[in-house]
Amino acid sequence: MEREYSEKVMDHFRNPRNVGEIKDASGIGKVGNPVCGDIMNLYIKVENDVIVNAKFKTMGCGAAIATSSMVTELVKGKTVKEAQSISNRAVAEALGGLPKIKLHCSVLAEEGLKLAIKDYLKKSGKPLDDVKK
């Protein structure tokens, strides 16, 4: 089973980065996949249009935890606009690839990020029209 996962996926599963929640989060994205049962909550803290912190709480398989961990690493230090362009493919590639059957986990990570950004824009009164779906 482990052979299907890259070393990077296993590392982010065994030693996930940024686990937890941000109490005064600028934006929160809550997503779930009813088919596999994965639930992901993604929190971002934004200052001067830059994501200065990101954390997650995920209940799910190893790939769901690894993709949550990786997406929080990828967004830190990026502007909100830059973070909006992070795709599920970018998350999967940063992890050295995912088995086909687990690609939906990277989609969940992308959706969680997009929802957190949308929540931030809504809370801060910024236009939502340029939010990528």
Image: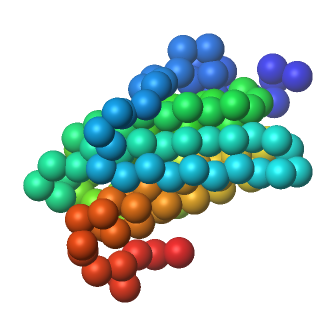
> As drawn, is 83 to the left or to the right of 112?
left
The residue drawn where x is 57% and y is 50% is 30
Q: Is residue 60 visible?
A: yes
User: Relative to 122, is 47 on the left or the right?
Assistant: left
- In the image, taking residue 13 as reference, residue 51 lies left or right, namely left
Q: Nearer the viewer, residue 36 or 75?
A: 36
Q: Residue furthest bottom?
A: 129
Residue 85: quarter of image = bottom left
Instruction: Decide: is 131 above or below 102.
Output: below
Q: Residue at x 48, y 24 (%)?
A: 19
Q: Quadrant of residue 102?
A: top right
Residue 1 falls in image quadrant? top right
Residue at coordinates 71% horizontally, 50% vertically from top-left? 32
Residue 28 position in % (x across, y down): 44, 50
Q: Residue at x 34, y 69 (%)?
A: 122
Q: Residue furthest left?
A: 48
Q: Is residue 96 visible?
A: no
Q: Position of residue 64 (x, y in %)?
A: 68, 37
Residue 11 location (% of width, % of height)? 58, 18
**Between residues 22 and 95, which one lies in front from this camera angle?**
22
| Residue 18 placement (x, y as % from top left) | 42, 26
